[in-house]
Image (cartoon, rainbow, N blue to C red):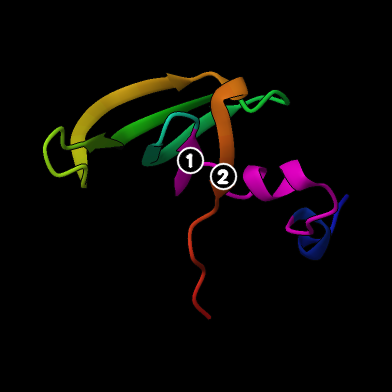
Amino acid sequence: MASADEEIAVKEPLDLIRLSLDERIYVKLRSDRELRGKLHAYDQHLNMILGDVEEIVTTVEIDDETYEEIVRTTRRTIPFLFVRGDGVILVSPPLRTA
């Protein structure tokens, strides 16, 4: 039987994600999309099922007259979301405070 220390040890990168099950995580995706949600399941390809998700999409447009960048952020909430792993750039576990 594994000790408590062995169960929470991080030996491989996916171990960090395993420790974040049922916790809120931050996921950065391609095309300037960010997600924050509760991690319900994942696999070795980083396909994930997230619940209670907040999606933030950032778009940058150029004004035709002034040529200035216009940055827009769009937010929406999604009850459940399947995230395909090939679009994942970064996964951040919740901040743990001692």
Q: Amino acid at mark 1?
A: Lys
Q: Residue at x 88, y 49 (%)?
A: 1
Q: Disc 2 and disc 1: Cα gap in Å?
A: 7 Å
Q: Residue furthest front?
A: 65
61 and 36: which is toward the camera:
61
Read off the magenta span: 8-29
Tag of residue 78 = none
Determine whether, in the image, residue 45 is placed left or right of residue 26: right
Residues at circles 2 and 1 in contact by the CB criterion of under 8 Å:
yes
Q: Which residue is mark 1?
A: 28
Q: Residue at x 35, y 31 (%)?
A: 51
In percent of width and height, residue 15 lies at 74, 46
Sequence-first tag of 2 and 1: 1
In percent of width and height, residue 9 lies at 79, 59
61 and 68: which is toward the camera:
68
28 part of magenta stretch: yes
Q: Residue at x 78, y 56 (%)?
A: 10
Which callout, 2 or 1, points to the residue nearer the camera? 1
In percent of width and height, residue 17 lies at 63, 44
Q: Which residue is mark 2?
A: 91
